[in-house]
Amino acid sequence: MNGKSITIIVGGGIAAYKSLELIRLFKKAGASVRAVLTRAGAEFVTPLSLSALTGEPVYQDLFDLDDEAQMGHIQLSRTADLIIVAPATADLMAKMAHGLAGDLATTLLLATDTPVLIAPAMNVRMWDHAATRRNLATLKADGIMMVGPDEGDMACGEFGYGRMAEPEAIFATAKAALGAPGPLSGKHVLITSGPTHEPIDPVRYIANRSSGRQGAAIAEALAKRGAQVSYITGPVNIPAPQGVEVIAVETARQMFDAVSAALPADIAIFSAAVADWRVDGAGATKIKKQKGALPIFTFAENPDILASISALPGATRPGLVIGFAAETDHVLDHARAKKKRKNCDWLLANDVSGDVMGGADNQVTLIRDKGEESWPMMSKKDVAERLAETITKALKTS
Ligand code: C5P
């Protein structure tokens, strides 16, 4: 980060205190940081703490003659390598999406041609609101990068998505955005995640309870370490991970095609809960209810993506192929058999008899030829971090 220049816009949210830690991380890494504090932000952190940490004046007013004499707001918007909005409140995001420029922060954001990274922070209902969804879609289409929000307890006592990403996560995303190399730089990872939907007819489908959270967390953990990640996901209701190429699919066959198209890869991780079967001959017209006659479906087998990729010959096979085994009983026995059958290099076994599918935590056992490791119950994010670390270490020693 040496020599990089960051502008941090601190919006008005309880998470503003975390921006102080974020500034400290950038300074420690050798970046120079300028802070812009919104009027609402100043209700949560003081200009004095920001300037003490940045070692620079804090910019607050659009019409401050002293500031304009030192550095005009247009110049302020152009001199950084990256602008970070943390916390990005619902209000700031709405203003950004609509191009409003009523204060220094929003003027700077409208006047800039520098990459912008936002770290949203708000109440879960505000995050879920249709207006925020619209604004988010606009910001994404405008090329604004995003990190978080995380799921968890909120200051207001509710639980859900809306907590600002932790300073370390914002820092890592910023580093990736600035093109800083990580231990997995130059490695291409493909990862499948989420469920598949197999149509019965144009309006009905067969699905499963996979939320895609574990796969998304792994994708993000690898991207953070500099990997180029192709994230192939079935239909999910979670935010897309940061810094990855998102390839959205619906059916197992589409997922298989997307995986084939994303090859070659150094590492392939199959965390998707792929439907084993599809309804044979699902038609283009809706099946009608008929008195006294129940529909009878016949099934066709879907391609086994993990087994197919593991079976690729020579250099076309990714160097490290990792599968998952979600089991409800005899977890390890089934998982060991699965590793053999599918011929993958590593297999992560998890017990899904509880509320793991769709939940926030996971307990996995990593099965490798050289032995097995049972990891304690931890958040899916921590599982992802540990897996990413294990992969990084394995590549170093291979
Ligand atoms: O056979 P089972 O579905 O339990 O195997 C689980 C592992 O195989 C997971 O890694 C899953 O992503 C992968 N899989 C696949 N294609 C399928 C079925 C499973 O890639 N059709």
Image: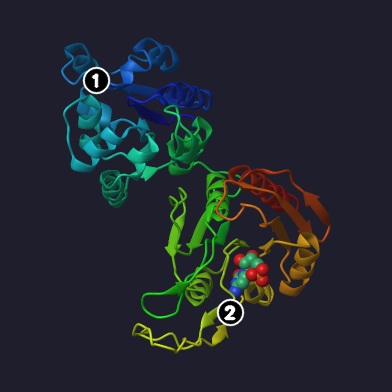
Q: Residue at x 71, y 49 (%)?
A: 396
The kind of secondary structure element at disc 1 is loop
Q: Residue at x 72, y 61 (%)?
A: 347
In three-dimensional space, the C-alpha distance between marks 2 and 1, rounded to whole angstroms, equals: 60 Å
Ligand 1 rendered quadrant:
bottom right
Q: Residue at x 30, y 39 (%)?
A: 114
Tell me, yes or no, if residue 185 can be seen here.
Answer: no
Question: Which quarter of the rendered picture does the C terminus lie within?
Answer: bottom right
Q: Is residue 89 above or below residue 247?
A: above
Q: Nearer the viewer, mark 2 or mark 1?
A: 2
As shown in the figure, which amino acid type bears the numbered disc 1?
Met
Mark 2 sits on what residue?
Answer: 303
Crowd band around label 2 with a 10 angstrom C-alpha radius: few (<14), some (14–19), many (20+) = some
Q: Tell which circle, 2 or 1, labels the residue nearer the N-terminal end.
A: 1
Q: Is residue 135 above or below residue 33?
A: below
Mark 1 sits on what residue?
Answer: 71
Tell me, yes or no, if residue 194 can be seen here.
Answer: yes
Any atom of ligand 1 within 8 Å of the CB at mark 2?
A: yes
Nearer the observer, 282 or 72? 282
Q: Is residue 214 above or below residue 94?
A: below
The kind of secondary structure element at disc 2 is loop
**Residue 97 at x, y percent in the picture:** 23, 42
Q: Residue at x 84, y 57 (%)?
A: 370
Any atom of ligand 1 within 8 Å of the CB at mark 1?
A: no
**Residue 45 at x, y percent in the picture:** 38, 16
**Residue 377 at x, y percent in the picture:** 70, 44
